């Protein structure tokens, strides 16, 4: 067997050869990477310039087309604008201030305002004070009962000619007076008890923004109410409910059912003539679709029934010959 003797000098020579080999191929590898980087970066730069040039050509083409098609392009503009939905606060029913909702029984007044309070609640995150139980109870995932809106009595806020309580405006920004016919009558405006409640309410309407209240809704079967209330209105609305056949429900169950499709509303502004009269101006008709049909399972259709059920029943006098 031949014995190989490894010396320190031979190790140094070998180490130098290995390091020279590594350095040589490291330089080659770096050149390759730099070349690739240069190619890729240049490609990206040229591609970016090409894209921007194409975009510029499209913009230039669009500019030329817009100018060259005048006035015909107004046809397309009108069609496009008609497709777009109005912002919620642009609709007449949501203009900040007090609104009077007039209609005969079954016109859709209460359903309209129930939907409007939902719509505005989803828009602002706040719900309404209401004089009647406009909704039935809801249940959360833990089985706890709750309501969206808060029941209130006007006398809780307005008493003896002054406002005695403030609105909880961090939770509520609407006030709904359901059926004004049963609450305020102009014929009673000479009575102290009437004025002690109505006058501070009207004053509160004048300072509603300072109190964080956006909307007052007055629902009534009478075309007008106390003149002082009417003079404070920002809008006067006459709804007509529109229903549609629930075809999907019939397919699934074989039963006939109708749902609220929406409301056709005639909206007007109030123009004062003098201290006792006003007229409706700038009247427009518009369509307000029902966005939340499933929510109407919580609508309390007979929201004033409970107060009449509590009355003692009068049996009458038996007829006798």
Image (cartoon, rainbow, N blue to C red):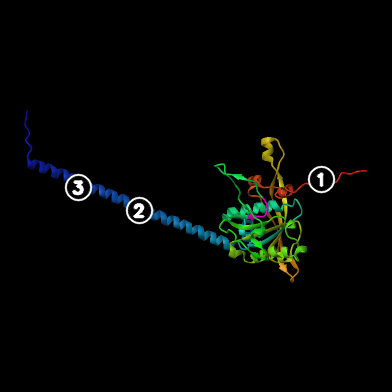
| Mark 3 and mark 1: Cα distance apart in space | 113 Å
Q: Of the two numbered discs 1 and 2 on the same chain, state the one appearing first in sequence.
A: 2
Decide which of 153, 14 is in the foreground and name it: 153
Marking on residue 23: 3
Q: Going 55% across and 62% down the picture, which residue do you hit?
A: 64
Q: Please, what is the dominant secondary structure of the magenta stretch? A: loop
Q: Is residue 210 above or below residue 316?
A: below
Q: Secondary structure at mark 2?
A: helix
* Quarter where residue 232 is shown: bottom right
From the viewer's perspective, is the residue at label 3 or at label 1 nearer? 1
Residue furthest bottom as drawn: 274
- State the residue position of label 2: 41
Q: Of the two numbered discs 2 and 3 on the same chain, state the one appearing first in sequence.
A: 3
Question: In the picture, which quadrant includes the C terminus?
Answer: top right
Q: Going 41% across and 55% down the picture, which residue do you hit?
A: 48
- State the residue position of label 1: 315
Decide which of 105, 255 is in the foreground and name it: 105
Q: Of the two numbered discs 3 and 1 on the same chain, state the one appearing first in sequence.
A: 3
Question: In the picture, which quadrant includes the N terminus?
Answer: top left
Q: Which residues are magenta?
A: 129-133
Q: Position of residue 177 (x, y in %)?
A: 68, 57
* Quarter where residue 271 is shown: bottom right
Marking on residue 278: none
């Amino acid at each position: 067997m031949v014995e190989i003797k490894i010396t320190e000098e031979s190790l140094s020579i070998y180490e130098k050869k290995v390091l020279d080999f590594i350095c040589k191929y490291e330089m080659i590898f770096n050149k390759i990477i730099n070349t690739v980087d240069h190619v890729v970066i240049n490609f990206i730069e040229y591609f970016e310039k090409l894209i921007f040039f194409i975009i510029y050509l499209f913009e230039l083409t669009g500019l030329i087309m817009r100018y060259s098609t005048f006035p015909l392009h107004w046809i397309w503009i009108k069609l496009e604008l008609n497709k777009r939905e109005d912002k919620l606060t642009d609709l007449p029913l949501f203009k900040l201030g007090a609104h009077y909702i007039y209609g005969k029984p079954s016109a859709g007044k209460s359903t309209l305002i129930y939907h409007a309070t939902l719509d505005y609640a989803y828009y602002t995150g706040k719900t309404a004070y209401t004089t009647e139980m406009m909704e039935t109870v809801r249940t959360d995932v833990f089985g706890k009962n709750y309501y969206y809106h808060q029941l209130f009595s006007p006398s809780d806020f307005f008493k003896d000619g002054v406002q005695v309580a403030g609105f909880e405006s961090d939770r509520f920004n609407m006030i709904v007076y359901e059926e004004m016919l049963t609450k305020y009558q102009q014929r009673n405006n000479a009575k102290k008890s009437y004025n002690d409640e109505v006058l501070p309410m009207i004053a509160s309407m004048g300072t509603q923004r300072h109190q964080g209240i956006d909307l007052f809704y007055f629902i009534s079967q009478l075309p007008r109410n106390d003149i002082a209330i009417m003079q404070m209105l920002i809008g006067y609305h006459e709804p007509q409910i529109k229903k549609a056949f629930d075809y999907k429900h019939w397919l699934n169950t074989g039963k006939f059912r109708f749902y609220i499709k929406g409301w056709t509303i005639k909206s007007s502004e109030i123009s004062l003539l003098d201290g006792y009269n006003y007229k409706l101006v700038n009247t427009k008709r518009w369509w307000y679709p029902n966005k939340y049909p499933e929510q109407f399972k919580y609508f309390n259709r007979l929201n004033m029934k409970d107060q009449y059920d509590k009355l003692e029943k009068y049996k009458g006098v038996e007829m006798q010959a």
